[in-house]
Amino acid sequence: MFTPAAERSVAANLATTLGQTLVFWSVFIVALPWAIGRVEGALGVPAFAFAGQQLAALAFGVVAAALNLWSGVALAVTGRGTPFPTQTARELVVSGPYRWLRNPMAVGGLGVGFAVGLYVGSWGTLAYAVAGGVIWHLVARPMEEDDLSRRFGDSYDHYRGHVRCWIPRLTPYRGR
């Protein structure tokens, strides 16, 4: 399932990463939350609301989106690949946001989904974001980590032993 990207320019990796991000966000951050909102409306599920809700959602969403995009840039530039498993990074990336989290792209993407749910007051979209995190953690993460361990050996295993998956480090990882 995981295949390193073909050798190509940084610009090509960045363009491919941007395209992948636009497709991913269109489906998982726009279309599916919209569909969830439609189902909630049809079922009469009330939206929640509180003072400053949309401002808080926008602030959280901007931070999460920036983390997600920064992660993609790190994979394209340093890793010489893309976030997509069939064009994955050719080099182990332990710089940029990866110095604090093992998978900042997942944290950022799930954070954007959570921000969308918060912005529109949708319990279903919040549950969808949480479910996405559980699925990623139980299904995608083990496969990705097995691949990284096979391809990068002790370097990845050391990194994995020092950088957590969901909770950021207080100090950046500096390698061995």
Image: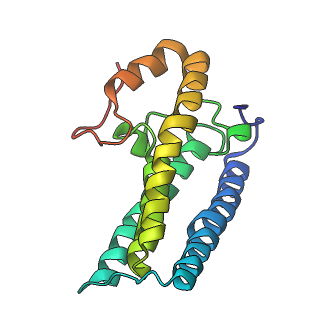
- Single out the residue that lies furthest toward the front: 43
Specify the quadrant that holds the C terminus: top left
**Residue 11 percent across, percent down from the top left:** 69, 53
To which quarter of the image does residue 158 belong?
A: top left
Looking at this view, is 137 or 124 the one in front?
Answer: 124
Is residue 107 positioned above or below 120 on the image?
A: above
Can you see residue 65?
no
**Residue 105 percent across, percent down from the top left:** 49, 49
Specify the quadrant that holds the N terminus: top right
Total numbered labels: 0
**What's the residue at 76%, 41% (across, down)?**
8
Is residue 41 positioned above or below 110 on the image?
A: below
Is residue 140 positioned above or below 67 on the image?
A: above
Can you see residue 72?
yes
Is residue 169 positioned above or below 126 on the image?
A: above
Looking at this view, is 21 or 43 the one in front?
Answer: 43
Looking at this view, is 73 or 86 the one in front?
Answer: 86
**What's the residue at 66%, 53% (across, down)?**
17
Looking at this view, is 88 or 73 the one in front?
Answer: 88
In the figure, is residue 74 to the left or right of 35? left
**What's the residue at 32%, 25% (across, down)?**
162
**What's the residue at 61%, 19% (across, down)?**
151
**Residue 6 percent across, percent down from the top left:** 78, 36
**Residue 63 percent across, percent down from the top left:** 37, 64
To which quarter of the image does residue 97 belong?
A: top left
